[in-house]
Amino acid sequence: MKKINKKWLVLLTIGAVVAVWYGLGLGDYFSLAQLKQQQATITQWTQGNLALSALLFTLLYTLMAALSLPGAAIFTLAGGALFGLGLGVILVSIASTIGATLAFLIARFLLYDWVQQRFGERLKAINGGIEKDGAFYLFSLRLVPVFPFFVINLLMGLTPISTRTYFGVSWLGMLPATVVYVYAGTQLAGIDSLNDILSPGLVTAFVLLGIFPLLAKVAIGILQRRKVFAGWARPTAFDRNLIVIGAGAGGLVTAYIAAALKAKVTLVEKHRMGGDCLNTGCVPSKALIRSARFLADVQRSGTLGMTTASAKADFGEVMARVQRIIKKIEPHDSAERYRKLGVEVIQGTATLQSPWEVSIETAAGPTTLTSRAIVIATGAHPFVPPIKGIETVNARTSDTIWALDSLPRRLLVLGGGPIGCELAQAFQRLGSAVTLVEMLPRILIREDEDVSVLISRRLAAEGVTLLTAHRAVEFHHNSEEKLLRCEALHTNGKTREVAFDELLVAVGRKANTKGYGLERLGIPLNDNGTIHTNDYLQTRYPNIYAVGDVAGPYQFTHTAAHQGWYGAVNALFDPLKKFRADYRVVPWATFTDPEVARVGLNETEAREQKIDYEVTTYGIDDLDRAITDEAAIGFIKVITPKGKDRILGVTIVGEHASDIIAEYVLAMKHGIGLNKLLGTIHIYPTMAEANKYVAGNWKKAHAPERILQWLLRFHAWRR
């Protein structure tokens, strides 16, 4: 039998039982007045048929609880009146727990898959909380009888809590109320209404019982902190409120926020202020891309009506310009600026000596500081894979490519991610013959396939040789040149040789965790080498935090800065207050030409998550501004739930995509749908108009056809 048929069978069965219950008025037999009136007769029969009556009582109670039928409180009283306190508690406890678990399982069977598929993304935080602390939450709810138990059964069935946990915690949590009600049943003669059982004082007692597991959770947290800090001598006073290790984007924002909040904060950096982004990443790469873009514009000048236009790159001058740009931006991240903001900046190497102590090796000698909290923001470095012979070819990375003083005639790029694609295109435009080797079947694997195809075609059209689905096997030399032997996957081991003059390795980045004392403190790492943190960016030690590339899950400058706020505030105010890091709306861009920008889900991820979605697209080749600028290439793709205008994700390929995406980031952050974007005035002619047009396409696809037909008749009548 198909799953859907089984669900309908369960629904029909439940509906039939409920119909019979209410149709025959069976609920009238389970009132307090009826129980008191028939107590003598039922008690006499029960005493003569104890085993049978106990079985029938348990089965009927279980059925009522499983189907959430009214009368459970009366049945609990009956358990005490008929079987006494001891046996009554046993029977009621067994029946109520089994019934509650059956109701839980029914809700899970009927609704769990649908709810998780439809709302899974928004339920991530709740699911995570239930998986971690579900037993505490359930115990609290069970202890407080003012919460309807049938609601708890239904809602918990929609969460990932295990059936075994649900059964055990429900039994334990309902036991105090069960004892109270069963005992009241033994005194049935003196009870005129349920209010005689649930007096204000007794309800207050249950509420206090409900608070108990939360207090217990706090107590357990304190015990865990004591356990993790065991063996370390905590200073009686501290030199600083906060020490930040690393002055990249994450560390700079953390230190800035801490100083703005009037904390005494020290920032330690062993290399250059600004980290990778300023010195070897975002800033130099975008400066290089801009110079290369100018050459590309000159080469297509004929499309703009120019009869002659020429330019030749002086690679030395291009690289000098890159360094000038770095120098111009450098003051924004300088030690001088941060000192003026109230941050103590120390140039040196920091090492954790204890959860509160940091030793710093400086040019003037070593020093040791203590701090209530520490934030690790040490960033990441390019990963160089252990390919045979790679150490013999002077492999360069995104950190070291800027030391080139002459343009390589042939550049080999290993890796088809954002960095590899950006620099491959830039060097090709500057005059290198670029070959890009990627082991996966396509470049930009995190994006949808149509994105990869468009960028691949653009790179190939500009002269980049793309070798996707090729695995680098060995680097070697012949008498004249450097060579890579790579294997074409899915071709029975067929190999080819690629000659090159310079090698750029761009296959990913690895967190900087060595040499900072993490091993001494036993701070664990994730499988990918980043520092393991909780939702609040805390490491194993609750006063030591990690932000930025060293922590993940994203390795972007803007997410490092985003985490820096959480790192600072949580480090300064925990345990009084702390905030979960929010990654619900994280945008990013690849700065190829055309650019690729994304926020939220793409089509591939929506399929993997089994979301019932639809796609609305708009071709930028139809946009007036794109046509006037000879930039009519690319598209906008918006993912929404089926039939709704709520934005789940957006992918943009086109000129200025990294700027155009900002409107969608704001919309997703604040719950603005496509209908409201459509009703927003956009300047004509601009690239941002594309956002309005894609919203218009969604609206056309969801036009109210029946109303429009009536309007057609209405206007015909008026004519």
Image: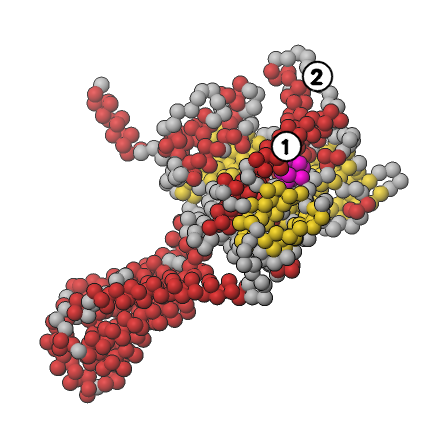
Q: Position of residue 597 (x, y in %)?
A: 54, 35
Residue 191 versus residue 309 in the image, above or below:
below
In this rendering, which labeled residue sits more in front, label 1 or label 2?
Answer: 1
Which amino acid, by three-letter code, is at mark 2? Answer: Ser
On screen, 320 above or below 480? above
Left or right of residue 252: residue 26: left
User: Which residue is farthest left?
Assistant: 37
Q: Image point 22% across, 18% down: which residue?
A: 719
Question: Residue 277 in magenta?
Answer: yes
Position of residue 501 in the picture relative to residue 597 (left or right): right
In magenta, the rendered stretch is 272-280
Return the residue nearer the eye: 576 or 466.
576
Name the element at disc 2: loop
Q: Nearer the viewer, residue 224 or 128?
A: 224
In-front residue for pair 189/712: 189
**Residue lying at 21% horizontally and 86% vertically, measured from the top left:** 49
| Residue 112 image-quadrant placement | bottom left
**Residue 479 in view, yes or no:** yes
Q: Tell me the amino acid under the disc marked 1.
A: Glu
**Residue designated by label 2:** 310
| Quarter residue 323 falls in | top right
Q: Which residue is mark 1?
A: 330
Callout 1: SS: helix
Identify the mark at residue 142; answer none if there is no mark. Answer: none
Between the residue at mark 1 and the residue at mark 2, the CA separation in whole angstroms equals: 33 Å
Q: Is residue 385 left or right of residue 195?
A: right
